Image (spheres, grey):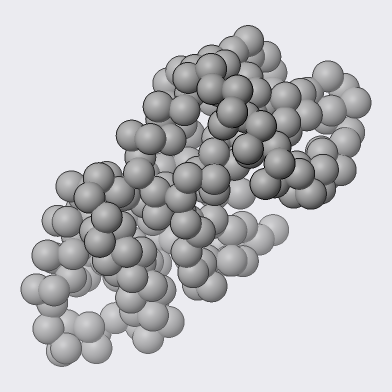
């Protein structure tokens, strides 16, 4: 089985603030911009929807309204939160993280540790760390964040590495780490922005 990460550079406080904001305009704008995507998502989860899960648009509405939620279908609210990240943020290059198998994220974190980069972890995106006001999914998607402060610290740690240190890291792992550094640089270019990642 293969997995993927979808990564967004986004103002984390803004996406969290969308939960329970009750903004009908935001809901309509998301529904309009992502109409085709929401339809595709419903097709993908047609069996679960037939069994009682909310549609993706209904899940987006629930997140923006702050409920009601059906905890049995936590996955839909997780993906709805991803849609809000997509609306407010910027999807960044995930070529080294889509698709992957096995312990790939462990290898990246091992490479980060080898370089002395301890402020961030790609495994963090596997956890169920959605904002606590949302139901947590039983399985997928996983979710994690790199805060602006973590990004700033990680960038300092990266810039402190030397070419010989980087040569000690497997070249594919290093390429993936360099991609992570680009996410961080993009986040750091915008005050208050960080990285939000979804695992599935």
What is the quadrant of residue 139 in the picture? top right
**Image quarter hosting the N terminus:** bottom right
What is the tally of numbered marks visible in this picture?
0
Instruction: Please indicate whether residue 88 sits to the left or right of residue 59 in the image.
Output: left
Q: Residue at x 87, y 22 (%)?
A: 51
Residue 164 x, y percent position in the rendering: 15, 89
Instruction: Please indicate whether residue 110 sits to the left or right of residue 15 in the image.
Output: left
> Does residue 135 appear in the picture of this structure?
no
Looking at this view, is 93 or 89 the one in front? 89
Instruction: Please indicate whether residue 102 sits to the left or right of residue 166 in the image.
Output: right
Looking at this view, is 11 or 43 the one in front? 11
Residue 97 x, y percent position in the rendering: 52, 66
What is the quadrant of residue 23 in the picture? top right
Q: Is residue 78 above or below residue 10?
A: above
Outermost residue to the left: 160
What is the quadrant of residue 157 in the picture? bottom left
Outermost residue to the front: 25
Looking at this view, is 59 or 166 the one in front? 59
């Amino acid at each position: 089985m293969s997995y993927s990460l979808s990564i967004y550079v986004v103002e984390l406080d803004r996406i969290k603030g969308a939960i329970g904001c009750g903004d009908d305009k935001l809901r309509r704008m998301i529904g309009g911009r992502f109409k085709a995507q929401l339809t595709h998502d419903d097709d993908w989860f047609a069996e679960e929807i037939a069994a009682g899960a909310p549609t993706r648009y209904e899940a987006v509405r629930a997140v923006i309204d702050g409920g009601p939620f059906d905890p049995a279908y936590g996955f839909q609210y997780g993906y709805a939160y991803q849609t809000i990240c997509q609306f407010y943020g910027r999807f960044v290059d995930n070529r080294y993280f889509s698709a992957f198998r096995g312990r790939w994220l462990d290898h990246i974190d091992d490479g980060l540790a080898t370089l002395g980069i301890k402020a961030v972890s790609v495994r963090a995106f596997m956890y169920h760390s959605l904002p606590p006001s949302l139901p947590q999914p039983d399985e997928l998607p996983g979710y994690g964040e790199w805060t602006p402060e973590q990004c700033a610290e990680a960038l300092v740690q990266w810039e402190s590495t030397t070419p010989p240190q980087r040569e000690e890291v497997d070249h594919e792992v290093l390429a993936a780490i360099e991609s992570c550094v680009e996410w961080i640089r993009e986040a750091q270019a915008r005050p208050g922005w960080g990285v939000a990642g979804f695992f599935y």
